[in-house]
Amino acid sequence: MRVLLVEHEAEEAQRMAKGLNEAGYTVEVAANGMAALRLVESTEYELVILDVMLPGLNAWKLQQAIRLKGETPVLFLTTPGGIEDRLRGLELHEDDYLLKPFDAKGLVARARKLLRRDRGR
């Protein structure tokens, strides 16, 4: 399963990618919205994990580009105080969100849930 992880904090991205790799996922990491957009336009992913706080192209515009291409499930990463971010993501058809901080097991469980649901469509 191919996953795009869009996270601007390098240590966080590395920790998440490691957990996903250990669970059997192939992970590509983008550190900003523009890099992620280039990958989304050229590669098929089964899941996109998208941090709300991105430099460059923001998460909302990236989410719109993902939706134009298809129905790839999107998991938003946000902070506990980011209620407005969660509401906006729902309006833009995010599939789920995960509150920071979280452990790798929680991320893998959410990824599995989304991928199972997507296969059922």
Image: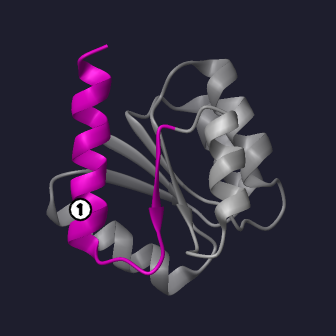
Taking the spot 72% from the left edge, 43% from the top edge, the residue there is 62
Q: Nearer the viewer, residue 11 or 115?
A: 115
**Residue 95, placed above or below residue 83:** above
Question: Which image quadrant: the N terminus?
Answer: top left
Point 44% across, 81% down: residue? 101
When asked about the image quadrant of residue 18, the answer is bottom left
Category of crowding for the residue at label 1, using alpha-carbon neighbours closer than 10 angstroms: few (below 14), some (14–19), many (at least 20): some
The magenta stretch spans which residues?
95-121
Using the image as rendered, state which of residue 112 and residue 20 is in the foreground.
112
Residue underneath mark 1: 21
Give the x, y percent position of residue 60. Answer: 76, 46
Q: Is residue 1 visible?
A: no
Left/right placement of residue 39 relative to residue 5 reads right
Q: Secondary structure at mark 1?
A: helix
Picture quarter with the C terminus? top left
Q: Pinpoint residue 9: horizontal percent, then vertical percent.
A: 59, 80
Q: Is residue 103 magenta?
A: yes
Residue 42 lies in what quarter of the image? top right
Q: Is residue 45 above or below residue 50?
A: above
**Is 92 rendered above or below residue 119?**
below
Q: Farthest residue in the right direction?
A: 56
What residue is rendered at 16% in x and 53% in y? 24
Q: List the single residue furthest toward the bottom.
A: 11
